[in-house]
Amino acid sequence: MATTVALTASWSIDAMSSDDDGLWPIGAALVCIGTMAVSGTLAFIARRTMR
């Protein structure tokens, strides 16, 4: 969870400073969802592999 928050926050700060369209919140939501999905999938795979 901390990885998702940190990555989304850093991406959002960078996107806010260079976005002219005002669409950075949509991108931030997609980054958050994608990071959470990948992190959860990798955690699941790691847990199943360790057994």
Image (tube, rainbow, N blue to C red):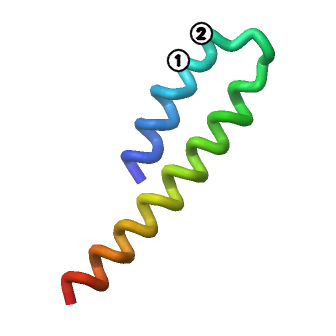
The residue type indicated by label 1 comes to Asp
Location of mark 1 (residue): 14
Residue at (28%, 74%) from the top-left corner?
46
24 versus 21 height, above or below: below
Looking at the rendered structure, the secondary structure element under dot 2 is: helix
The location of residue 6, given as percent across then percent down, is 41, 37
Characterize the local packing of mark 1: few (<14), some (14-19) or many (20 or more) Cα atoms within 10 angstroms.
few
Residue at (34%, 76%) from the top-left corner?
45
The location of residue 8, given as percent across then percent down, is 51, 36
28 versus 16 height, above or below: below
Left or right, 36 with reference to 1: right
Looking at the rendered structure, the secondary structure element under dot 1 is: helix
Left or right, 45 with reference to 16: left
Q: 46 or 2, which lies in front?
A: 46
The residue type indicated by label 2 comes to Ser
Name the residue furthest bottom. Answer: 51
Characterize the local packing of mark 2: few (<14), some (14-19) or many (20 or more) Cα atoms within 10 angstroms.
few
Left or right, 9 with reference to 50: right
Location of mark 2 (residue): 17
* Quarter occupied by the C terminus: bottom left
Q: 40 or 49, which lies in front?
A: 49
The location of residue 1, given as percent across then percent down, is 42, 53
Query: Are the residues tagged 2 and 1 within 8 Å (C-beta)?
Result: yes
Query: How far apart in space, not on screen, are marks 2 and 1 (Cα)?
Result: 5 Å
Residue at (44%, 69%) from the top-left corner?
41
